[in-house]
Image: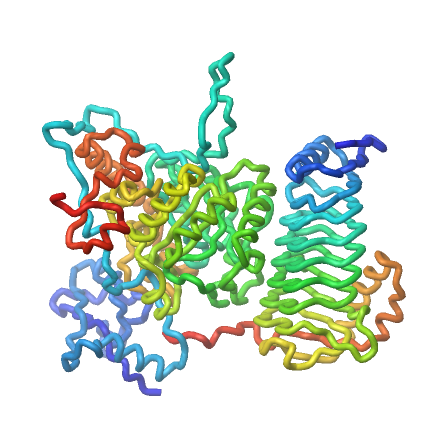
Amino acid sequence: MRTLVPARFIVERDASKCIKCQVCVNQCSFDSHYWDAEDDEVKVRPGKCVGCHRCVMFCPTGAINIRRSPLEYRENYSWEPEYIEDIQKQAEQGGMLLTGMGTDKPHRIYWDHLVLNASQVTNPSIDPLREPMELTTYLGSKPDRIEIDPSTGNLATRLAPQVKLNVPVMFSAMSYGAVSLNVQQSLARAAAEIGTMWNTGEGGLHPSLVKYANNTTVQVASGRFGVYSEYLKTGRIVEIKIGQGAKPGIGGHLPGEKVSAEVSLTRMIPQGTDALSPAPQHDIYSIEDLSQLIYALKEATNYQKPISVKIAAVHNSAAIASGMVRAGADIIVLDGIRGSTGAAPKAIRDNVGIPIELALASVDTRLRAEGIRNQASLVISGGIRSSGDVAKAIALGADAVNIGTAALVALGCRVCQQCYTGKCAWGICTSDLKLTKRINPELGARRLVNMLRGWALEIDDMLGGMGVNAIESLRGNRLHLRGIGLNEKELEILGVRMAGD
Amino acid sequence: MTETVETPRMVKIDTAGIYYRDLNARLRKLVDEGVDQIVLQNVCGQRYIASDLSRPVDIKICGTPGNDLGAFMNGSRIEVFGNAQDCMANTMNAGEIIIHGHAGDICGMAARGGKIFIRDYVGYRAGIHMKEYQDKKPVMVVGDTGQDFMGEYMAGGVLVVLGLGLKEGQKHKANFIGTGIHGGVIYISGEVEQHQLGKEVGVAELDEHDREILGGLVAEYCEHFKRDAEAIMRRPFQKLYPKYLRPYGRMYSY
């Protein structure tokens, strides 16, 4: 069938600069560039370019530029080109539209409508260059009260298992199969070096990554891929994945062609079969069932690991979170509507869920009101782009944040949203061995560590500016936030006052 | 907790009134100390038995263990002289569980290996999302019948439903059998109508290879529960198999 979907990008090649080295041909995994031997020149296939910029970055003479297609549609606020093109695709293929990464829809980004406080004369700021600043965060359930043994002066209260983070930023769950092994190696190595956590996602734990066990969160999801007793014991945190922000309420399908020999070994399923993660976990149909699985995992790990439960941010997250804490979760992970994914139906990604800022504020408020906020740590994710977002999340009540897209961007990702194709030209979301080699774990880890180091310095500065010297003093301290351009209801849910108030 | 040491490697525990955490902690300790055989008496609802043992052992349970019996189990052998509750053998990797009675919902969920024999019937979602991997292939034999969603999303392994408790002319009641199945096989005796099966399920007669596998499993079942294997094998069986290895491969546009 002839396609009626126009090309989204135009590839421009400056003939005066092109030396016909064909680097672009080799770098483009989407077959946009090709070598025409007859004409003795490199040519472009219209419509193939996804705007990933790999060729632009690797062209030794800077001969290539990518521009948005200038194809103009008649102005129409309702029928934007995206909707027309989506319908054309579905008319041609007859399925759900699949996409990658987080939503690109203009759902309000509340981080951009919040500003942080800074000390001036009455409460002077702190200079992080000469004062010690503390970003250390401990994840895990905290007791209601602490008792000291008067005879020894030691702590008499038995603490639930705690996980120490040197920075309150962890790497989100990204499974082997969704991302390449070299990406996971980069994340694991960086997490170990900086003192934070990376997360296996639901794809099992590759043997080469067991040495990073102390910095590894292992996931138990509906597919139970790679889940066995040693896996559970190896992880520092065990995470039950109920939902994720990019696709709340639905499952996932890793297509058989992505289940390579190595992926099948890690997931413990035959090579080439679909890896189906059904929407619900079949043993969790209620909060009581969730509690049963939480305690099954606690028993299976002899009560030595915090059990984390991850849900997508949805309308009644606060009530659900309350149930999760009462069910025994030590860590709650909330993933907002801007949360990313390797593959999700576009309709779900763009339309289901709520912004993480609102979910975070309402969950923190509810848990505090019920007097159980201390019983679980609160981790949020879904659209954290900078250290400013991290600081605001912590002021809104989070203990720590997870970053997925930001970490991949550090590795080269240009957010071209083609992860589901398995052809990622940057070697990130692919199991193609040739493409995978494009990520060097050592250099990848260095980039990630550099980024987190930069963020940590910035958070130090922001804390110092607020006149506090520990991230603990910022946590849930909404007086350090003010809203801009928000209505009264939004301010009420966020629990922050208007700027100037 | 009354404990009787029969031999240095065999211990009997009267579990009446023992909290599950204390019982499981005791089991962990005994296994770490080298005990190979454990007999648990008067078990009444204690959960998660044998879900975290450092090595395979032999456990006999008299009474009714609670939910998640043998969850994540990796090689132990459990024999229950009574009924089992929900989530038995949840995500089991290896081992054997024999139930001299019936079992609750979600037995053998996502099991990757090992053997499960249930003398009587099972609840909802039995064998759901069982999978197989290399030399690991879970098998579950149910003597009587089960409820809805048996073998749903099955990705590997063998589920046998013998239908022994069905009366003359009585059909299996379960609906949505094998919905989403994309691996493994279900052998079922007793009448099942097409509308009771998931749309991804194919139905076939057993061939020689199937009868060989089924015969071996029926023989094991009969050995455990003292039944007549030949009589069972004379019953008519159907083979339920996945029609597609990628049932949802055509759902998406790119």
Judge from the rendering whether residue B174 lies leftward or rightward of residue A45; answer left or right.
right
Which of these two is toward me, A330 or A268? A330
Count of numbered marks: 0
Q: Where is residue A60 shown, x and y percent of the image?
A: 20, 58
Quadrant occupied by the N terminus of chain A: bottom left
> B67 and A81: which one is in front?
B67
Q: Nearer the viewer, residue A285 or A19?
A: A285
Horizontal relation, residue A364 to residue A257: left or right: left
Seen as rendered, the residue at the extreme top is A151
Residue A226 location (% of width, % of height): 55, 53
Quadrant location of residue B144?
A: bottom right
Q: Is residue B15 above or below residue A74?
A: above
Q: Percent from the top left, x then y, of residue A411?
A: 31, 51
Residue at figure coordinates x 20%, y 37% from the top left: A462
Residue B216, placed above or below residue A212: below
| Side (left or right) of A398 relative to A116 | right
Q: Which residue lies furthest to the left in this view?
A: A121
Above or below for A458 versus B121: above
Q: Residue at x 44, y 63 (%)?
A: A249
| Image quadrant in which you'd find residue A124 | top left
Q: Can residue A394 be seen in this view?
A: yes
Question: Looking at the picture, how far across and down is residue A216, in whole percent?
Answer: 45, 42
| Residue A183 in sight here | no
- Give me the residue at 38% from left, 69% from top: A345
Q: According to the image, what is the colour scheme of the structure?
A: rainbow
Residue B25 falls left or right of residue A331: right
For the C terminus of chain A, the quadrant is: top left
